[in-house]
Amino acid sequence: MRVSLKDVASHAGVSIKTVSNVVNDQPHVTPAMRARVQKSIDELGYRPNLTARHLRKGRTGIVALALPELGNPYFAELAAEVVDAAAEHDYTVLLDHTGGRRDQETLVSQGFRSRVIDGLILSPIELEADDLRERAPVPLVLLGEREYDLPYDHISIDNVAAAREAVRHLISLGRRDIAFLGARRGRSQPAHLRLRGWREELDAAGLVADDRLVAATDGWGHADGAAAMARLLDAGHRPDAVFAYNDLIAIGALRVLSERGLRVPEDVAVVGFDDVVEGRFGAVTLTSVSPDKASIARMAVESVLSQLDGAPRQRARRIHAGYTLVRRESTLGHD
C-alpha cells in the first residue's frame, strides 16, 4: 500500500503542510521538527511522488543527453555519470544517439523532444553555429571540443593544455619522433585542439612537428587506430612515441605495434586520451589523459537546472573541467 503525506502527518502528529515542507526541503522548519517528521518517513517507508512534484513546477523531470557514440567507452562512462548526477536532483535522463551525424544532431538540437524534456545536454560533432541559432527554447548545455560563439554554456576540458602535458611527458622520457594518431579528415576537424597541443609542445621543446607523423582517421575506434599505425609503419615512418586522439585509437595502435614486433614502451611509447576502463586492463596498461567525467556530468546537470530555475547570468559560460595525466606501463614500462 502506498504511503501518503497524510499517513506521515498522522504518524508524526503534525500537519500535512509541515510534512510537505520537510519533504521538499523548505526553510523555516526547526531541526527538531525535521527530525521528527523524517523519523516517521523512515519508519513508514514513504517515497515522494517525483512525477507529481515535477508537474507542479510545470516540468517533466526528464533531461535529454545526446551523444555521438554510445558504443565508445568514454561516452558510456560519461552517460553513467550524468545519470547519477541527475538522479541526485530527482531527474531522469533520456539518452539519444546521434552517431555524430549532422542530420541527427540537428534533429535533437531543434527540439523534436522539447515537449517531453526539461533540458538538453548535447555533445556535437558536426553541427555548425548556424544550426544552433534557431532552436526550441529548452535549456541547452554543450559538451566537447567544438567551440561556438553562442549563448549556451559549454563544458569541456582544456584540450590544448591536456595534449601538451601528454606530449611533454613523452619528451621528458627522451622521445623525439612523436606521432599523432587521429587527426580528422573532412570539414569538422573535431581533433584540432589536441593536434594543436601536439604541435605547440613540440615547438616549445625545439622539436620538429613532422606532418609525416600525423595520421588521419575516419573514425574513433580500435580499427581506425590500428590502420593509422600500420600506414605510418608501412610508409617507413617509425616514431619512438605515439600520442593518440583517444584511448581506442591508442589500443588499436598497441595491437599493431605488438604484431610488428615493436616493444611498448621500449621501442615506442604510447599515450591515449579519455582514460577508459579498457585501457587499464590490457597486457600493457595505457598511459592516458583522464578527464574528470564526474565533474563534467555534475556541471552539465547543474547548468540545465539553474537555467530552469531562472538563475540570472550575464552571458554563457565556457567552463573547463579538470583532468589528470595518468602514467602507466605504455610509457613507464613494468615495475
Image: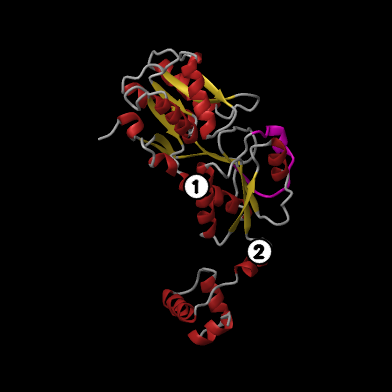
Q: Does residue 58 belong to the magenta stretch?
A: no
Q: Which residue is at 63% across, 57% downward?
A: 62
Closest to the camera, between mark 2 and mark 1, is: 1
Q: Amino acid at mark 2?
A: Lys
Residue picked out by circle 1: 77
Q: Which residue is at 42% across, 30% downward?
A: 254
Residue picked out by circle 2: 57
Residue in the foreground of this view, choosing between 102 and 281: 281
Q: Does residue 131 belong to the magenta stretch?
A: yes
Q: Secondary structure at mark 1?
A: helix
Instruction: Name the mark on residue 223.
Output: none
Q: Is residue 257 left or right of residue 25?
A: left
Q: Which residues are magenta?
A: 126-142
Q: Is residue 48 left or right of residue 259?
A: right
Q: Establish if 72 lies above or below 19.
A: above
Question: Quarter-wise, where is residue 313 in the image?
Answer: top right
Residue 46 point in image, percent of width and height: 52, 77
Q: Earlier in the sequence, mark 2 or mark 1?
A: 2
Q: Is residue 315 visible?
A: no
Q: Establish if 238 lies above or below 97.
A: above
Q: Secondary structure at mark 2?
A: loop
Q: Is residue 127 visible?
A: yes
Q: Residues within 10 Å of mark 2 (few under 14, many from 20)?
A: few
Q: Residues within 10 Å of mark 1 (few under 14, many from 20)?
A: some
